[in-house]
Image (cartoon, helix red, strand yellow):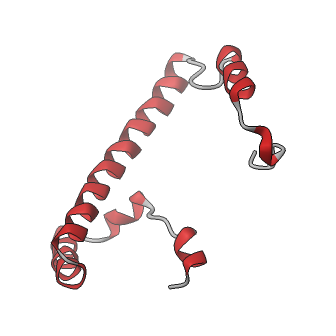
């Protein structure tokens, strides 16, 4: 896979539900054979951490909606972010 394609590749956590546990374990086994135990261990850590981060983010969004919290969009937080932002890209990343 070319480097440019690798940079744009990401995992969609919700898609993992489309594979059953047996298939996931078989994929892990093949992954460890093809990539080594350290790589397979890093993959497990990634799956656990990204799954957790998705759940935490969902909680934050739900709590924000249910309790009317500003989250990271309060005027004070926006002022802090915008005043500390590196504007070398002229704001094109927004």
In this view, 87 is above or below 63? below
Q: Residue at x 31, y 57 (%)?
A: 46
Where in the figure is residue 43, as x and y percent of width and height?
Answer: 28, 64
**Quarter holding residue 3:** bottom right
User: Residue 1 versus residue 67: which sits nearer the camera?
Assistant: 1
- Looking at this view, is 17 or 12 the one in front? 12
Residue depicted at x 60% and y 20%: 70
Residue furthest top as drawn = 76
Image location (x, y in percent) of residue 32: 18, 77
In this view of the protein, which residue sits in the foreground, 49 or 24? Answer: 49
Residue 48 is left or right of residue 53, and the answer is left
Of the pair 47 and 61, the residue shown nearer to us: 47
Q: Quadrant of residue 54?
A: top left
Q: Is residue 71 above or below residue 91?
A: above
Q: Is residue 41 above or below residue 50?
A: below
Q: Quadrant of residue 33?
A: bottom left
Q: What percent of the width, then of the height, locates residue 18? A: 34, 69
Residue at position x 15%, y 78% in the image = 29
Percent of width and height locating residue 47: 30, 57
């Amino acid at each position: 896979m070319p480097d440019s394609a690798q940079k744009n590749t990401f995992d969609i956590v919700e898609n993992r539900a489309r594979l059953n546990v047996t298939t996931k374990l078989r994929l892990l086994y093949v992954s460890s054979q093809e990539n080594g135990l350290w790589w397979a261990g890093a993959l497990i850590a990634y799956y656990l951490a990204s799954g957790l981060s998705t759940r935490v983010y969902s909680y934050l969004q739900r709590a924000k909606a249910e309790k009317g919290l500003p989250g990271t969009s309060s005027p004070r937080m926006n002022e802090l972010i915008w005043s500390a932002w590196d504007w070398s890209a002229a704001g094109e990343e927004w």
